[in-house]
Amino acid sequence: MLKKFLIFLVVLGVLSSIFYSLFIKGWYEFRKTTSTPKEFLNHTEVSKTSYSYDSIKLMKKLRAMLSKREGFFHNSSFDDSTILIIDTIVYSPVHNKLAFILISKNPTAKQMIPNNDEFKWYYNGTSYIGRQKDSDYLLEEIGSMFTNSHDFGDLSNRIHGDRFERFNKNKIDNYKYNLNDIRFWNSPIWRKLDSLASH
């Protein structure tokens, strides 16, 4: 009996480590380098429990969008076998808004010109903002997509760099602030979701 319990604890520890690496680690990583002025950096944090709960809730919503081929998922290469990874979630100070990076994983065989010999998978990435309404989140895709990468780590780094360091490069309207800028949460990019949430 004790042996089974110890095996259970080891398996639970391994699964927790994997979940942390895939879903929570990125929550801290986005602060590494940034062009956002220090006085405007968003230092909002949530508990691991809340982060995990939101990851599951968002994943359920994204899966529903995938099944309807909505937005990012309009391409025919997306299907039930597509693996979705929420790379990083950042929160507004009052936790009623969030932004996150999404990366999809598909077999290389689904590409128009597949390179099956060298690579087994390819990855696409994008980002979303979410506004809480009741117990759900309204979602809107933001920024440009990153497509056809064969290196998950490289894609993750590139999309993080774009959203947390260079998103504000044009300094205009919707893309005025990086996702780790405290001013981002009240910027014009939220007009549509704020309006939907108020109805």
Image (spheres, rainbow, N blue to C red):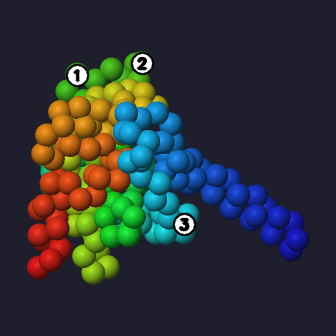
Q: Position of residue 173 (x, y in %)?
A: 12, 45
Q: Position of residue 124 (x, y in %)?
A: 30, 37
**Disc on the earlier residue, 3 or 2:** 3
Check disc 2 and give the amino acid type. Answer: Glu
Check disc 3 and give the amino acid type. Answer: Ser
* Distance in Å between CA atoms under marks 3 and 1: 43 Å
Label 2 sits on residue: 118
The residue tagged with tag 2: helix, strand or loop? Answer: loop
Q: Is residue 179 left or right of residue 23?
A: left
Q: Give the vertical position of 192 relative to 114 (above or below).
A: below
Q: Is residue 125 left or right of residue 195?
A: right
Q: Please tell me whether mark 3 or mark 1 is closer to you in this view.
A: 3
Residue 47 — which label? 3
The residue tagged with tag 3: helix, strand or loop? Answer: loop
Q: Quadrant of the N terminus?
A: bottom right
Q: Please tell me whether mark 3 or mark 2 is closer to you in this view.
A: 3
Task: Say how many tags the image has.
Answer: 3
